[in-house]
């Protein structure tokens, strides 16, 4: 269950996943799309900590 609470000092209010400058400077291009990366992360998390997250597949 999600419970909304007031922000705390130091909480990030906005994030931006823009790697265009990194790409311009280094030519870096991700090889894994976000959805696939999240699925892999959840799989690794469950493998390490056990199935503590609800199955959403």
Image (spheres, rainbow, N blue to C red):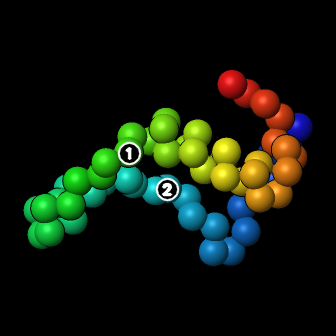
Quarter of the C terminus within the rendering: top right
Indicate left or right for 9 with 5 as reference.
Answer: left
> Which residue lies under the disc numbered 1?
32
* Residue 6 shows in the view: no
Q: Residue at x 83, y 35 (%)?
A: 54
Q: Position of residue 11 (x, y in %)?
A: 63, 67
Q: Residue furthest bottom?
A: 10
Q: Residue at x 48, y 38 (%)?
A: 36
Q: Residues within 10 Å of mark 2 (few under 14, many from 20)?
A: few
- Decide: marks 1, 2 in contact (CB < 8 A)? no
The Cα atoms of the two marked residues, 1 and 2, are separated by 23 Å
Q: Nearer the viewer, mark 1 or mark 2?
A: 1
Q: Is residue 51 above or below residue 14?
A: above
Q: Please name whichever residue, 50 or 11, is drawn nearer the observer in this view of the structure.
A: 50
Q: Residues within 10 Å of mark 1 (few under 14, many from 20)?
A: few
Q: Position of residue 30 (x, y in %)?
A: 30, 51
Q: Please name whichever residue, 11 or 43, is drawn nearer the observer in this view of the structure.
A: 43
Q: Residue at x 88, y 37 (%)?
A: 1
* Residue 45 shows in the view: yes
Q: Residue at x 75, y 51 (%)?
A: 47
Q: Earlier in the sequence, mark 1 or mark 2?
A: 2
Indicate left or right for 34 with 39 as reference.
Answer: left
Q: Position of residue 28 (x, y in %)?
A: 20, 61
Give SS at disc 1: loop
> Which residue lies under the disc numbered 2?
14
Q: Quadrant of residue 6?
A: bottom right
Q: Residue furthest front?
A: 47
């Amino acid at each position: 269950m999600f419970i909304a609470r007031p922000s705390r000092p130091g909480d990030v209010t906005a994030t931006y996943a823009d790697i265009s400058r990194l790409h311009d400077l280094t030519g870096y291009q991700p090889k894994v799309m976000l959805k696939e990366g999240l699925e892999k992360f959840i799989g690794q998390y469950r493998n390490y900590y056990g199935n503590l997250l609800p199955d959403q597949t």
